[in-house]
Every structure is written in C-alpha cells, then in structure tokens.
Image: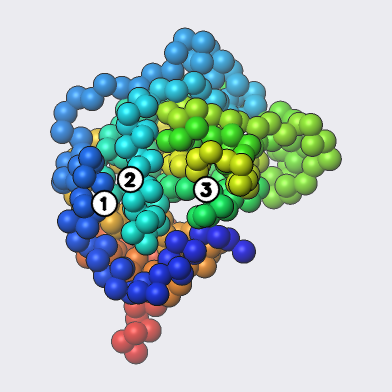
Amino acid sequence: MSSEPWYFTRNSDLEAKLERVHDPSLWRGLAPALNLTDDPFPGAVEPYALNDEDLNQARTQVREEGYLHSTPSIPAEICQQMAEAVGNIIAAGYHPIFLSLYDEYWQILKRTSAALEPILGPNCYPLADYWVWSISLETSGSGWTPHRDLQFRDRPTLREDGAPLLVTAWLPFTDTGPLNGCMYVMPTDRDPNLPDNPDNFGFANLQDVRALPARAGSILAWNQQILHWGSAASKWAKNPRISTGVYFQSADVEPFGPRPIDFQKELPFQQRLAYLAANLLAYHQWHRYPEPVLEMAIRCLQAGPGYLDMLPPALKAAVEARLRARTS
C-alpha cells in the first residue's frame, strides 16, 4: 500500500485543515521567506545551465541509456528554502505537494527549462503534471515503486535518433543517496523488456541497476520508457529526501497534456490550487486518498472557469459523473 495518504490520514481535523487550503495567508505564514503572488514570472530570471562536461554526457546518455544526471545547477540557498518550506508544510498537517503554491517553485521550473533546451530543443516548457516528495521514516517511508512513466502511449515520445520529446525532470532540494531514498534506474539499453514488453518490469541481472545519488540542486531527467523507482529510507539517513518531479516537453510538438505552462502568462493562486488538485485526482488511483481530499480537489477545480478541462478526458468524465450523481 502507498504511504502517500499518511500526510492526510494522520490529521484528526482533516476536513477543517482542507477548508483552509484556499487561504493564501496560511501558506504565507508557513513559508515567510517565499512569495505567493499572481505572477511568478515577472521578468527575466537567470537561467540554470548544465556545465559543459555534464551537457556533453547528457546529450548522449539520454539517447542511449534513457536518462541524464547532472551536478548541481539550482543554487543551494533556493534548495534550502524549498526544503524548509516542505518541512513546515508537513508539520502543519499538509502534503508536500502544496510547495507548488509558491512563486519560487514555478521560477525554478522556468529556470530549469533553459537547462533542458539542449536536450529538448528551444523554448521547451513544463506541464503542470508534477509531484513533490519528502522521504524519511517519519513521513512517506519510501519513494514510488518500480514503474515507467508511460502516460502517453498513443504518441511517440522519442525522436528517430532516440532523443526525448518529453522527460520527467527530477530535482532534489536535499542531498539524496541510498539511505534516504535516492532514485534507481534500469538503463534502457540494458533493460531486457524494451522495446517489446514495457509492461514487464522483471529482470535477472541486478548488476544492471544503477543508483543515482544526487546533491541538492542537481538536475536529473529521464524518458518515458525507463524503469525507475525511489528506494526506502533508513534510520541512518541524515536528512529526508525532498524533491520534485515535473514533465518537460519539446516545443515543436503538440502539448502532451492539458496543463502546459506558458511563462508569458500569470499563474494566480487559484489556478495553482487547481493544478495541485488535478494532480491529486490523477494519482488517486495509485494512492487512494481519503474522501475529504477528493472533495477538496474537486472544489478547487470548480473554483474557476475551465479548470475541469485541466483533467485528462477520462478523469474529467469521472469527476463530472460524480458531480451529476450528487444532484440526481
């Protein structure tokens, strides 16, 4: 069973807490060093960039082995602010995903898009399909189980030369290693199930598995095909593994999902709440969140015109059927 629901089920006053998520003053109080405005993209920001050595390796490795793994690009001060905010959010009884309400979270994504342009092409951008983790024995005790991100099976996600059109960018805000749930992958060129049997996760040669310890601020990314997972936390870990994962895609193909991010537009608080809610509903099938969480998420998606369109068609239909059932 997923440990994700713990962030909500530990609260005896869950419904009262969920009623407060619409109040920006709650979030400002939990992270006074961060900002919450209607426009997280007010102007030019310094882009992140992979150093020459990382970039040369990344271009080849992502085509041949399905992933890239850089040294730190995100400044240490920003990582510390993100990690501290997550700690405060959890202590207040909420899920780490609420980190995505803050301007700085979105600014990190804008700056990361520049670092990924050599991989995805000019003007690549994120989708608001993301997650935030805090892995420790005290919280969610392990990362997600082995899986592939094969969410878009109806479309090619690789170019003819193996370069990705879509990646999951994984950004650690704390140092990660085997003791606190770092990522593990099966390189695509060693995976016996690719390309013909991607739904099979079995393999015999454990030595092909690759651990990806990473310092805070590193940029990791992988394609849709690679088998990957987060490991379990140990009592010997010195800090939790706090990280976020976000889809980024090439700009020369149609959006892969209904929530593309346009850095030229405002991103008001209620819209960020709706993005967050859409992700909670999308991942409910694996994590089985309590009913009050689902109701909160639906309320967030009802709060603005067109917000329900942020959901994939099948999920939108399920939510609309649920709403109709209330009135029948």
Indicate the position of residue 174 as horizontal and vertical percent values: 46, 35
Q: Which residue is mark 2?
A: 85
Q: Which residue is mark 1?
A: 30
- Residue 185 or residue 266, whichever sits in front: 185
Name the image quarter holding residue 304: bottom left
| Secondary structure state at the residue bearing disc 3 | strand
| Secondary structure state at the residue bearing disc 1 | helix
Indicate the position of residue 238 as horizontal and vertical percent values: 53, 38
Going from N to C along the chain, the mark reached first, 3 or 2, is 2
Location of residue 66 with respect to 84 vertically, above or below:
above
- Residue 301 visible at all: yes
Q: Which mark identifies residue 135?
A: 3
Name the image quarter holding residue 325: bottom left
Mark 1 neighbour class, 10 Å CA radius: few under 14, some 14 to 19, many 20 or more:
some
The N terminus sits in image quarter: bottom right
Q: CA distance from mark 3 to mark 2?
A: 15 Å
Q: Identify the amino acid type marked 1.
A: Leu
In the displayed structure, does residue 252 sit left or right of residue 268? right
x 23%, y 41%: residue: 34
Going from N to C along the chain, the mark reached first, 1 or 3, is 1
Location of residue 129 with respect to 192 vertically, above or below:
below
- Residue 163 visible at all: no
All told, the count of numbered labels is 3
| Secondary structure state at the residue bearing disc 2 | helix
- Residue 300 or residue 144, whichever sits in front: 144
